[in-house]
Amino acid sequence: MTIKVVLADDQALVRAGFRFIIDSAEDMEVVGEANDGDQAFELATRLRPDVVLMDVRMPKLNGLQAARRILEADATRDVHILMLTTFDLDEYVFEALRAGAAGFLLKDALPEELLSAIRVVASGEALLAPRAARALIKQFLRQSPARAAMPAQLNSLTERERQVLRLIAGGYANSEIAQQLFLSTATVKTHVSRLLMKLGARDRAQLVVTAYETGFVDPASK
C-alpha cells in the first residue's frame, strides 16, 4: 500500500524539497500541501492521509495547535503526525508529543531518515525515540519540576509490563526490548498493546511522556 503524506510548512522551498524526497520513494506519495495550520487541518480532514509532516512554527494556526485539532477530531482519528523542527529542544514539540503526535524529526535529517521516520509513523509504531525525543522530554520536565499525578492504572501493571514501559521510556525499539528481556518481538508487541490500553495512551510517544511526567521513570536516572 502507498503511504499518503500531507506536507505542512509555510516555506514553499522546504515543501518542494520534502515532496521530491517523498515522491521518489516507491511506497509513498504527497497528496497535499499546506502553508499554515488551518490548511493542514482542512487537508487532513478531507484527504485522510496516513501521515501529516507538520512544521512546528507556521502562521495563523501553528503546528502544535493544528496537531491538537487533528488528533482530537473523530474524522482524523487514524492520522499520524510527525512534527518537524529546526531545534531538537523545542517546547512546542514536547507539547505535541504530550497531545499525541507520533514523534518528531529535525529539518536537517538525511533523506533516508525522513523516509524511515514516515514509514515508522505510518505503521503505527510511533517515532518516539530517536534518543533526542527522550532528551527533549527530560529537558522540559527538569524545567517544570511539577509532576502529574500517578495514574491509578500504573498500579495495575504487571511486573513485566513495568519492565517494558521503562525500556520504552529509555528509547528502545521492540526488537531491542525483546533482546534485553529475552522475549520474542511478538510478545513485546502484545505487552505494548496492553500498556496502551491500560494507560489510555494514543501511542508509544504518549507512553514515554506518561512515564516521565508521573515520575515512574526519573529523568535524572537515564
Image (cartoon, rainbow, N blue to C red):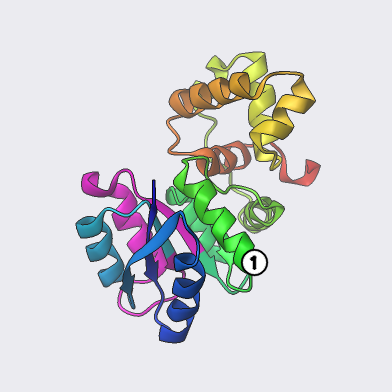
Residue 54 position by quadrant: bottom left
Q: Nearer the viewer, residue 70 or 99?
A: 70
Secondary element under disc 1, as helix, strand or loop, is loop
Please give the name of the residue rendered at 39% of the width and 68% of the height, measured from the top-left corner: 7
Q: Residue at x 67, y 15 (%)?
A: 159
Q: Is residue 78 rendered magenta in the image? A: yes
Is residue 150 shown left or right of residue 60?
Answer: right
**Local crowd size for mark 1, using a 10 Å CA cut-off: few (<14), some (14–19), many (≥20):** some
| Residue at the extreme front of the image, as rendered | 26
Q: Which quadrant is the C terminus positioned in?
A: top right
Identify the residue under disc 1: 88
Q: How far across and how far down the image is residue 90, in percent?
A: 58, 67
- Left or right of residue 46: residue 152: right
User: Residue 209 vs residue 201: left or right?
Assistant: right
Measured along the vertical axis of the image, is residue 31 above or below residue 59?
Answer: above
The quadrant in which the N terminus is found is top left
Out of 40 and 196, give the one closest to the viewer: 40
Foreground residue, 33 or 102?
A: 33
Determine if residue 216 is in view. no
Q: Position of residue 142 (x, y in %)?
A: 68, 54
Whether 63 is drawn above or below 141: the answer is below
- Which kind of residue does numbered mark 1 sit on? Asp
- The answer to which image quadrant residue 154 occupies is top right
Image coordinates for residue 115, horizontal then vertical, percent: 55, 59
Q: In the rendered structure, which segment of residues is drawn in magenta?
A: 54-83
The residue at 56%/44% (across/down) is: 209
Residue 87 vertical placement versus 148 (above, below): below
